[in-house]
Image (cartoon, rainbow, N blue to C red):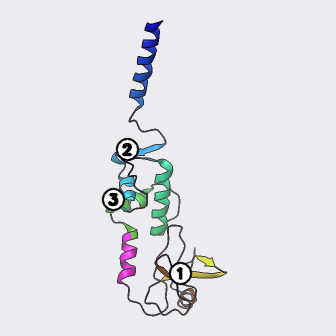
Amino acid sequence: MQTKCAILVILCFCLNLSCAGFVHSDSVWVGNSPALQFLLKCQLVKQKANGLSTDDIYTKKQMEKGIIKLQILAGLPVTGVADAKVLKMVERNKCLLKSAKQRTRQGTQTDCRCNGVLDYNGNGQCRSTYLGYRWCYVSQASVCGDRRGTGGRWWSHSACSQARRYNSFNIE
């Protein structure tokens, strides 16, 4: 009886060891995925910092959400799939979000116009409404009469009226 119990304990221990460290089929390991490395670098997927051995393993759902954010920023059709266009951006290795932030900081526009920034949900650039009116992000120096600040960004309804007049945006 003791021998059977000892064998059972050893068998359970070996099974646990053989499963430890393996990536589940619904997971992606950072080391095997240039796309996930890019999404982490560009902060489109939140990096884990728990100090655990699984910090470099992410779910496919986390990766899909990161790809969706990337597709929104790039103005691509939102599929959540790492298609050829997404892989080309990964290959270029340039974060779109940083570029948009840099353009916003560099912009010194003093008139009332949209600055081209979209949030992670694809809002901005007169694509969505608030209180029944289209809105977009504007520079801090903008002279829009209705300019408001939220979360460190400035936005306006009237900039969309200006954009419509000059046909300088595309509503999809």
In the depicted structure, whether residue 85 falls above or below residue 144: above
The furthest residue to the right = 132
Secondary element under disc 2, as helix, strand or loop, is loop
Horizontal side of 81 relative to 133 (left or right) equals left
- Report the magenta residues as a range: 98-127
Tag 2 residue: 52
In the rendered structure, which amino acid carries the disc numbered 2? Leu
| Residue 103 percent location from the top left of the image | 37, 79
Which residue is pictured at 40% across the width and 69% down the height?
Answer: 97
Horizontal side of 74 relative to 123 (left or right) equals left
The furthest residue to the front = 2
Q: Is 76 in the magenta?
A: no
Which residue is pictured at 49% across the width and 42% down the height?
Answer: 26
Return the residue nearer the eye: 165 or 22.
Answer: 22
Quarter where residue 85 is shown:
bottom left
Task: Decide which of tag 1 and tag 3 comes sooner along the chain.
Answer: 3
Task: Decide which of tag 3 and tag 2 comes sooner along the chain.
Answer: 2
Mark 2 and mark 1: Cα distance apart in space: 41 Å
Secondary element under disc 1, as helix, strand or loop, is strand
The furthest residue to the top = 1
Secondary element under disc 3, as helix, strand or loop, is helix
Quarter where residue 46 is shown:
bottom left
Where the C terminus falls, by quadrant?
Answer: bottom right
Of labels 2 and 1, the one closer to you = 2
In the depicted structure, whether residue 3 falls above or below residue 57: above
Tag 1 residue: 136
Question: Within 10 Å of the Cα at label 3, are there few (<14), some (14-19), or many (20+) other Cα atoms?
Answer: few
Return the residue nearer the eye: 26 or 89.
Answer: 26
In the rendered structure, which amino acid carries the disc numbered 1? Cys
Tag 3 residue: 91
